[in-house]
Amino acid sequence: MSAGGLHHVELRTADLRAAVGSWGWLLETLGYEPFQQWDHGRSWRLGSLYVVLESAPVPGTHDRRQPGLSHLAFHAGDAATVERIWAEAPEHGWSRLYEDRHPFAGGPDHRAAFLEDAERFKVELVAD
């Protein structure tokens, strides 16, 4: 592995069951495969990178607008794939963000879909 490359991303969730439903669908749609499973967590892997969902040991809420992590951005394939994910996302627990500016909410030369899960974790799905 190259120094500086991400090894894994770990997200703490208040509702593991709901998060597995929405994040599992999204990650598997993007090509990740189920990797690990334990009582309080799950992970999915793509190449050497894996994403972990784990039950938060302390109660509270996440707000991407406060100091901390704003969002995760994923390469999502071609424009048609991004549009398909955008269309199907609400059926899997995701809300669409910036609908009035979709698919160019990131600027006129940046085609992407922006989604938010029930806990307000935001993802950006970038088209090639």
Image (cartoon, grey):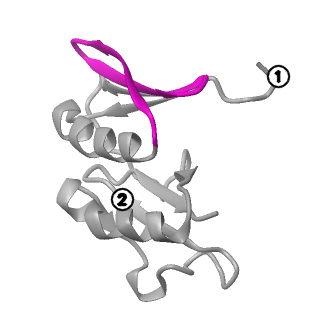
Residue 89 location in percent, x, y? 29, 61
Residue 121 location in percent, x, y? 39, 50
Q: Nearer the viewer, residue 20 or 33?
A: 33
Question: Magenta region: which residues?
Answer: 31-50
Label count reads 2
User: Mark 1 or mark 2, which has the lower sequence index?
Assistant: 1
- Determine the residue positioned at 61% across, 22% down: 48
Q: Amino acid at mark 2?
A: Glu
Q: Quadrant location of residue 85?
A: bottom left
Q: CA distance from mark 1 to mark 2?
A: 30 Å
Q: Amino acid at mark 1?
A: Ala
| Residue holding disc 1 | 3
Circles 1 and 2, Cβ within 8 Å, touching? The answer is: no
Residue 32's place in the image compared with 99, above or below, is above
- Determine the residue positioned at 20% across, 35% down: 15
| Residue holding disc 2 | 116
- Determine the residue positioned at 76% across, 19% down: 1
Residue 26's place in the image compared with 53, above or below, is below
Residue 17 location in percent, x, y? 17, 33
Residue 79's place in the image compared with 109, above or below, is above
Q: Residues within 10 Å of mark 2 (few under 14, many from 20)?
A: many
